[in-house]
Amino acid sequence: MNISLRLSFLFLSVFCLTQTVAQTQKVSQSPPAELRGAWIATVANIDFPSQPGLTSAQIKVEFDSILDILKAMNMNAVFVQIRPAGDAFYKSATVPLSKFLVGQQGAMLDDSLFDPLEYMIKSAHDRRMEFHAWLNPYRATFDPDTSALDSLHPLRSLPDRRKAEWFFRYGNKWYFNPASPSVRQYLTNVVKDIVLRYDVDGIHFDDYFYPYKEKNINLDDALNDYDKFASADHNFTDIGDWRRNNINTLIEGVSKTIKKYKPYVKFGIGPFGVWRNKERDPERGSNTRAGVTCYDDLYADVLLWLEKGWIDYVAPQIYWSIGFPAADYEILVDWWSKHLYGKQLYIGHAAYKINNSANDPNWENEEEISNQIAINRANPNVSGSVFFSVKPLLRNPLGVQDTLMSSLWKYPSLVPPMPSLSKATPATATVCRVKGTPSTIQLTWNLCTLLSGDEMPFISPSTVSMGRASGSSIIRATYWDSHLFTPTNGTLKITPPSKENTIPM
């Protein structure tokens, strides 16, 4: 080999090595703001708790253990399923405790004062992690046996005539009927109750709207909604458009309710990864051949929700590998990034498929997740990642957990800010109770002009102490909610967060 050829070969080798190192460094760099999260599934005890019927102490230990590991991985958000099937992982006067929590739906916890949701939120916040309350809105049961439901569950408590309006059975599950205005109001009230009573950072719906079609079971027969479609007051000529509008109405109502009471709380969706195939929609569909789509099968028009501003972020479940023929990860990330209407995009990754996919050998590649995150970071419209779900991620298949901790997420990162939420007009709070001594006054407040006493007696255990300091009056506000109330013209208004502040008078 002559000297010229050797030099050329050496140059090419150095160039390739340099490019590889540069790419590796680029991937391993931690952006200053990047959402890093995981879905914690409670349905069928997929992730948590390990089994139903644990004691309150055991529940705390298990949840804290999960969060400790996620925090060590430099995650900054968790999406915890608190409503898996018409039930609750929180104390409620209207929704029964989940059988996946207590064993028998509606049974009591061993500690009557323990509220799992309150504890989980505090645990996340103590670790500087966002807590998104994940709800499955329409799934009413996880099996067909309604006799095991608690008396609080509307499938048990409603008269038969109302049950026929509210519910339908499809396969081995019961579902809330999206066409029922009463159902929409009920589900909106469920969200409202959570938002008002808990310091959640977000409300999160997953991909279940109208149910996924099951083999050899006709969904139209189960819905039996053609008469309702024909008689309802609307201008739709296609039943698919009408069904989509039923879901749209719920999403809009939930969004407005959240923003009315706590405009800083985020509302997001984790939809199926394909909105619509290009074959069905040449102008807006993705270059995919998915057998199911949000728009045509689940009747979920996610793009409309983004366009209307009803949701603050979208986290599509792009559970396919790079290069997968029917639904290529890279194609879908690019597609979603171009249809955001100014909202944030987090990508859902399939941790459960790593080294565990019978029909896609790409998941046997230990670099698959690294390559996916590299694609995310190369796209300026992608704001982070969410993994489904915790348990397979923590099993560390192909060393993915090690890679995240040692390279991809080696350094902490902030949750990306949402400037649109900071522009929301703060709600006005009014002092409702005053007590104290001549030297100390304690004020307790709630959103009196917005809520009745039955809906929300007090927003949080908040107190304000008044005194004198260096000849100037001060108010020191200490509270457990995420916003500071300062005095203006005899009322209290919400201003940017600060856990404790001294305000000169």
Image: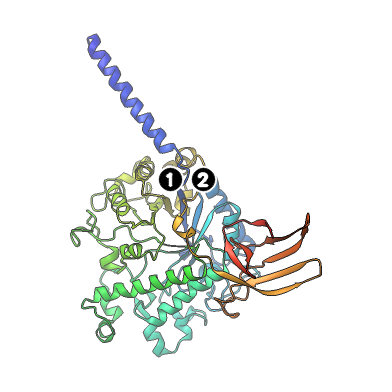
Q: Which residue is mark 2?
A: 73
In this picture, is 245 found above or below 6? below
Q: Is residue 147 visible?
A: yes
Q: Residue furthest right?
A: 438
For residue 342, side relative to residue 94 (left or right): left
- The answer to whether 502 is drawn above or below residue 430 in the figure is above
Q: Callout 2, which amino acid?
A: Met
Outermost residue, top side = 3
Which element type, helix, strand or loop, lies under badge 1?
A: helix
Whichever of labels 1 and 2 marks the residue nearer the N terminus, that label is 2
Name the residue beneath numbered marker 1: 397
Residue drawn at the location 26% of the way across and 18% of the way down: 9
Answer yes or no: is residue 171 visible.
no
Horizontal side, residue 500 vs residue 426: left or right: right
25 with respect to 461 (left or right): left
Locate residue 282, reporting x and y percent: 18, 58
Q: Quadrant of residue 208?
A: bottom left
Q: Which one is nearer the viewer's eye here, 150 or 224? A: 224
Secondary element type, mark 2: loop
